[in-house]
Amino acid sequence: MFKHLKFLNLESNDLEIIESNLFEENKDLEAISIQDNQLKIIGEKSFDNLKNLRFLMLEENKCISKNAENDSMEVQISSILSKIKIMEISCILSTTLWYPGSRHFYTCSILQCDLTNSKTFKFNLDYGSSQKSPDDIQAVAIIESKLQKIPNQLQNDFKNITILCIKQCSLSTIDRNDISGFKQLIELWLPNNKLQSLPDDLFVDNTKIERISFSCNRIEQIGADLLTPLINLKFANFKRNSRIDIIYDIESTEISLDELKQSILNCGEGKKCNKKIQTDELKFQNDVNKFLYNENFKDFTIKGLKRTFKVHRFVMAARSSIICEMIEKNPNLNGISLTNVTDEVIEEILDYFYDDIMPKFANLNDALMLYDLAMKMNLQDVILKARKEIVKMIKKEKSVEVLELALKYKDSDLMSIAFEVVKETFPKMKFKANLLNDEVKIRKLIKELKNYWKNIDDTISRFSDMNFFENELDEFNESEKITNLK
């Protein structure tokens, strides 16, 4: 029966014995989970004929421990694991723009893999023709994968990373030893997992860390001295947890570092949070969080340039009146496409949707994309913030893009600011005072400005090829280009 079975899930039953001949007729099995049972006996040759077995999960069996009466059981398990085929975990190597900040990092991304048993896998790193090595990897991102604890193998293979991100992976425990090997770590992002406690000494060996995130976990206990070693802390996110719901950002005046430390102290080991949460309210909050971050309940798809994001229809509708209207008009709508913005920008918007975290607007291009997306979705808070950041970062060579985007959404304030920057490009020319009121002429102006900047870029490139400049091309900024062409 079931001779071609490949995956077998026997989790959360009351199994006590696995007979030696249990899998005799199931030689094609590749993955078996017997987690959360009452195992006492495993037949000596139970798994011997499973030549394709890649995953064997035996965690949370209450009768498996390292005490004297179960020593033989531990030996059996070690013997079984030693026979399992080592599976290579595919890693995507690319240069990624990390948020917050505007720096690019050479990143190893691990998506939708099972890392539960570190004895059954190794990381497959294909550098192609880049001549890079593991020492060049600056960030590791593990997303939508299965693990309960950070694999020790990460510290062996990626010891020089400055960023570690484990998101939506059911991570349930963490201690000092899990990250102590990452001596250069600056950012630790562990959102959307199942962490319940953070120990006092977690960061003792990682004093360089500046940014941490434990949002959307189930944290109820925190060591009072958790943050003491982090003398350069700039950002800490504890939003949407059972007993703490706070975010600290050094660039914001909303929450001070002292207030954050006081919240951690109040929600410390065994202490109740000063934010009085009644038992029923706490249970309700936990139940909602389980629903929000369970992949099985995500019923709406956002298609990006390279990635597809699974989300909740009701969250999208609740946060965006535009999406709500789209769903009301078409109740069968189960997704949208956003291919005119980067996947990183979509992630930032989803952080805003789920956790109310305002995007950081790392650079002008991101600010323009976020403004465009926020306008389409009618996200007023993001629109106001994006407009402010665009005004701060606008440059002459980008003024035409800002002007075009402002015209698209009839944003007169942003149009006026962009137009003033356009005029700075031609200081000897006097534009008509009412030009902004003539949409036809403004569109013609935008077209001509695009040609103007394109021709400058082409000319500079040709001049560089002809070796006219003492400077290398990449040392020129746009204002220098104009100066050298006059």
Image (cartoon, rainbow, N blue to C red):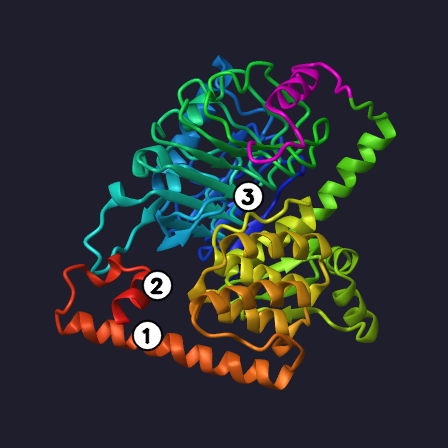
- Judged left or right of residue 270, residue 150 is left
Q: Residue 119, located in which quarter of the rendered image?
A: top left
Residue at (60% x, 39% y) in the render: 193
Label 2 sits on residue: 478
Question: Residue 342 location, x and y as percent?
Answer: 50, 62
Question: 293 or 70: which is nearer to us?
Answer: 293
Residue 23 makes an appearance in the image? no
The quadrant in which the C terminus is found is bottom left
Instruction: Tell me whether the residue at label 1 lies in contact with that at label 2, contact meaning CB atoms closer than 8 angstroms.
Output: yes
Residue 456 shows which numbered tag?
A: 1
Label 2 CA crowd tier, 10 Å (few <14, some 14–19, many 20+): some
Kindly identify the amino acid type of the residue bearing the numbered disc 3.
Cys
Helix, strand or loop at label 2? It is: helix
Question: Residue 75 location, x and y as percent?
Answer: 40, 26
Q: For marks 1 and 2, give the CA distance.
A: 9 Å
Label 3 sits on residue: 169
